[in-house]
Amino acid sequence: MFQKLLPNKVQTSTTKVLVELKKALFGFLKAQATLISITTLIVLVGLLVLRVEYAITIALIIGIVDILPYLGTGLVFVPWIVYAAMSGDTHFAIGLGVLYLVVLVQRQVMEPKLLSSNIGLDPLATLIALFVGFKLIGFLGLIVGPVLLVIGRTLHHAGVFQDIWNFILGKKEA
């Protein structure tokens, strides 16, 4: 009933916006799944090289923990490295540290590229949205910044901003 009250142009724009947002959401989920899979694989190989017992199980757990934004693998690696160092196993602690560093670098290098290609955002714009979001509202801004960028891009592609501008200027549709 509510939809019948809206003009056709608004209905069309709304449909375009919802389709674009759905694509962006699935792109984001696909990018995160890819990043988590790569992290899990790197951790598995590293743990096998370090000859850790139950390497597959630990790698899968670290992969699951990697879902947490910006805590992720550090939640497991940092205490494990500290424990290994304090218990006197410095070679193992160094090996874990190197593995953690490789995982961090891989994540930082690949995340903007994968997110941008799967969501359809420019990598630089994604990084700027992350930075501005973090500076404005802190940790939550790391999520809010890119989401607002996706919404803005979607509204732009659907022509909503142009329609609003034309309405302000009093122009009629052709």
Image (cartoon, rainbow, N blue to C red):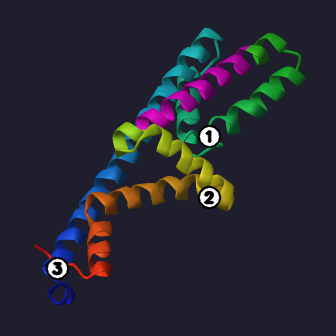
**Residue at coordinates 58% horizontally, 21% vertically from top-left?**
55
Instruction: Measuring from the top left, give residue 99's x and y in whole percent.
Output: 65, 19
Magenta segment includes 111:
yes
Name the kind of residue labelled 2 in the image.
Answer: Leu
Q: Quadrant of the C terminus?
A: bottom left
Name the kind of residue labelled 1 in the image.
Answer: Gly
Residue under label 2: 140
Question: Which span is picked out in magenta?
Answer: 95-114
Instruction: Measuring from the top left, give residue 101's x and y in whole percent.
Output: 67, 23
Q: In which quarter of the image is residue 33?
A: top left
What is the number of the mark on residue 172?
Answer: 3
First-in-chain label (2 vs 3): 2
Magenta segment includes 127:
no
Q: Nearer the viewer, residue 67 or 170?
A: 170
Q: Pointer 3 and pointer 1: residues touching (CB < 8 Å)? A: no
Q: Quadrant of the N terminus?
A: bottom left
**Residue at coordinates 60% horizontally, 55% vertically from top-left?**
133
Q: In which quarter of the image is residue 114?
A: top left
